[in-house]
Image (tube, rainbow, N blue to C red):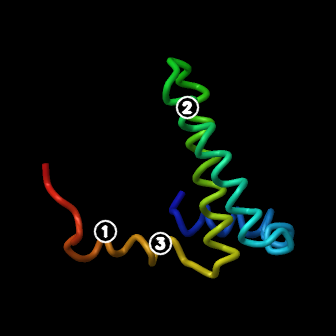
Amino acid sequence: MRIKDFQAFISERYEKTDRERGVPKTFMWFMEEVGELSTALASDDKANQVEEFADVLAWLCTLANISDVDLEKAIEKYTTKPVTGYKPK
């Protein structure tokens, strides 16, 4: 599945409710999932890590949808031109 397809899937299922909740509250949900991912990464529970990565991606798509951002277009900065602003190690 492409990112665009997953973002559309999330939109079809959740966007009405997500827009009603708004960006600030949705961002709080996203941050909660990031915290859960952090906890999962500190453990040896691979299944939980996989689940939390999926949750973070879904909530990122939700934020992008209600902010009218196409994630596939957004990542073109990494996929179609040289990346700037990072320091190689």
- The quarter of the picture where residue 17 lies is bottom right
The N terminus is located in which quarter? Answer: bottom right
Dot 1 lies on which element?
helix
Q: CA distance from mark 3 to mark 1?
A: 10 Å
List x then y, in percent, for residue 12.
77, 68
Q: How many marks?
A: 3
Left or right? Give the position of 20 relative to 50: right
Which amino acid does the dot numbered 3 rest on? Glu
Residue holding disc 2: 49
Amino acid carrying mark 2 in the image:
Gln
According to the image, label 3 marks what residue? 72
Question: In the rendered view, does 78 fall on the left or right side of 6?
Answer: left
Q: Residue at x 66, y 54 (%)?
A: 30
Badge 3 element: helix
Furthest toward the bottom, the residue is: 68
Residue 20 percent coordinates (x, y): 86, 73
Q: Secondary structure at mark 2?
A: helix
Against 59, residue 18 (above or below) is: below
**Precedes in sequence: disc 2 or disc 3:** 2
Report the residue at 13% width, 48% height from top.
89
Q: Tell which of 83 and 11 is nearer to you.
A: 83
Mark 3, Cα crowd under 10 Å, few <14 / some 14-19 / many 20+, is some
List x then y, in percent, for residue 72.
47, 72
Mark 1 crowdedness (10 Å alpha carbons): few <14, some 14-19, many ≥20: few
Q: Earlier in the sequence, mark 3 or mark 1?
A: 3
Give the amino acid type for the residue marked by disc 1 in the picture. Tyr
Graded by Cα atoms within 10 Å as few (under 14), some (14 to 19) or many (20 or more), the crowding at tag 2 reads some
Residue 70 location (% of width, % of height):
54, 77
Instruction: State which quadrant residue 61 falls in.
Output: bottom right
Residue on which the image places disc 1: 78
**What is the CA distance from the residue labelled 2 to the residue labelled 3?**
24 Å
Q: Is residue 46 left or right of residue 51?
A: left
